[in-house]
Image (tube, rainbow, N blue to C red):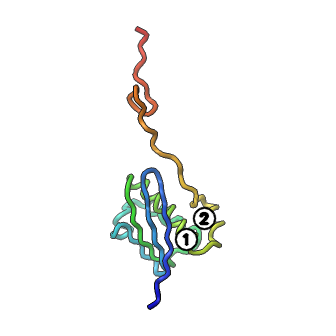
Amino acid sequence: MAQAVEFLGTGRRKTSTARVRITPGTGKITVNRRTFEVYFPLESQRMTVQQPFVATATTGKFDVKINVQGGGPAGQAGAVRHGIARALLASDVALKPALRGEMLLTRDPRMKERKKYGQPGARKRFQFSKR
């Protein structure tokens, strides 16, 4: 019995992590065992997720299974986009210039800054009073 070819990619954004598996298929996308449209109801998030396919002209050529956890919807969409881009790169190295040109292989390093002791937030200070 022949094993189906599958390519893996891990994407991260803020505190979200997405594990992506792509296999040649019809373009069906499943996120955490739910359909893509149900999991990402906003059109902007759907466009973010599909950006790697649009950039490489591979829309509808791969079935995608995604397991994503942590963070909020926007961070998860960014993590999924990063994971799909990495999985596409694993499937075909010739797609690297297209993915690199759209900045899809670069992990976004922006994270929430930690709260420091002696102040109410990460940067905010308590109100100064001379007396």
Per the image, label 1 sits on a secondary structure element best described as: helix
Residues tagged 2 and 1 counted as in contact (Cβ below 8 A):
yes
Tell me the distance, in whole angstroms, between the alpha carbons under discs 2 and 1.
Answer: 9 Å
Q: Residue furthest front?
A: 1
> For the residue carrying disc 2, how many other residues have a C-alpha within 10 Å: few (<14), some (14-19), or many (20+)?
many
- Type of residue at label 1? Leu
| Residue 110 vertical position relative to residue 53 in the rendered view, above or below | above
- Type of residue at label 2? Leu
| Residue 24 vertical position relative to residue 48 in the rendered view, above or below | below
Pinpoint residue 78: horizontal percent, then vertical percent: 47, 57
Pinpoint residue 85: horizontal percent, then vertical percent: 54, 66
> For the residue carrying disc 1, how many other residues have a C-alpha within 10 Å: few (<14), some (14-19), or many (20+)?
many
Q: Residue at x 33, y 70 (%)?
A: 33
As rendered, which of 117 and 42 lies closer to the eye? 117
As rendered, which of 73 and 91 lies closer to the eye? 91
Per the image, label 2 sits on a secondary structure element best described as: helix
Q: Residue at x 58, y 56 (%)?
A: 106
As rendered, which of 17 and 130 lies closer to the eye? 17
Q: Earlier in the sequence, mark 2 or mark 1?
A: 1
Q: Look at mark 2 in the image and give the residue it sits on.
A: 99
- Evaluate whether residue 47 shows in this view: no
Instruction: Please state, as top left, top right, bottom left or bottom right, where the N terminus lies in the image.
Output: bottom left
- Residue 68's image quarter? bottom left
Judge depth for marks 2 and 1 and give the one in front.
1
- Residue 40's image quarter? bottom left
Pinpoint residue 99: horizontal percent, then vertical percent: 60, 65
Q: Look at mark 1 in the image and give the residue it sits on.
A: 88
